[in-house]
Image (spheres, rainbow, N blue to C red):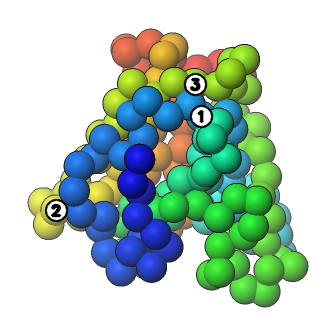
Amino acid sequence: MRVGNDEEATRGPRQGNSEWLRGARIVGVLGIFYRPEGRMGEPEAVAFLLADGQSVLLTCASDGTLHVGAGTWPHLPDWCVPAAQWEFAELGRLPQPPDGGWTVLRTEERRDDRGEVHEAVIRCEGGRFVVTGGDTVGIRFTRGHRGVAATT
């Protein structure tokens, strides 16, 4: 699996195949929050923790586009300055992963008319994660394929 690196994630949209997580097992999903603002709103980034010890980080740029890159779990990304004011935290409205994690069936990148990624869909057994770019990162989990919001 190749997801790029932090430098590629901040430079522009990742090039190549959007199947960047196919077959991976997601064992956790954490938000990255700026603590002085509290955790009331959306996270600044979302980290998908994988069974093999790697992580994938989805962040949004100042123009609201979504970038996918290699994560740094359990360390915060370099852009979390000062590091003492940032934290990884669980996202309360997402379900807990099943035993062994979610197996990723496929991923999709939805692009705007300029070709920039604005949304990523990670389809797993039993549901899908939808991550959107904007001022902050939005994330939701829906069960099945009908788009019904999951209950937590």
Q: Nearer the viewer, residue 107 or 35?
A: 107
Q: Which mark is residue 102?
A: 3
- Residue 130's place in the image compared with 46, above or below, is above
Label 3 with label 1: CB-CB less than 8 Å: yes
Q: Position of 95 compared to 25: left or right?
A: right
Q: Nearer the viewer, residue 99 or 30?
A: 99
* Crowdedness near tag 3: few (<14), some (14–19) or many (≥20) residues, C-alpha within 10 Å: many
Residue at 78 percent across and 86 percent down: it is 82
Amino acid carrying label 2: it is Gly
Mark nearest the camera among 2 and 1 is 1
Residue at 59 percent across and 34 percent down: it is 26
- Provide the residue designation for mark 2: 115
Q: Which mark is residue 26?
A: 1
Mark toward the start of the polypeptide (2 vs 1):
1
- Kindly state the secondary structure of the residue where label 3 is placed: strand
- Kindly state the secondary structure of the residue where label 2 is placed: loop
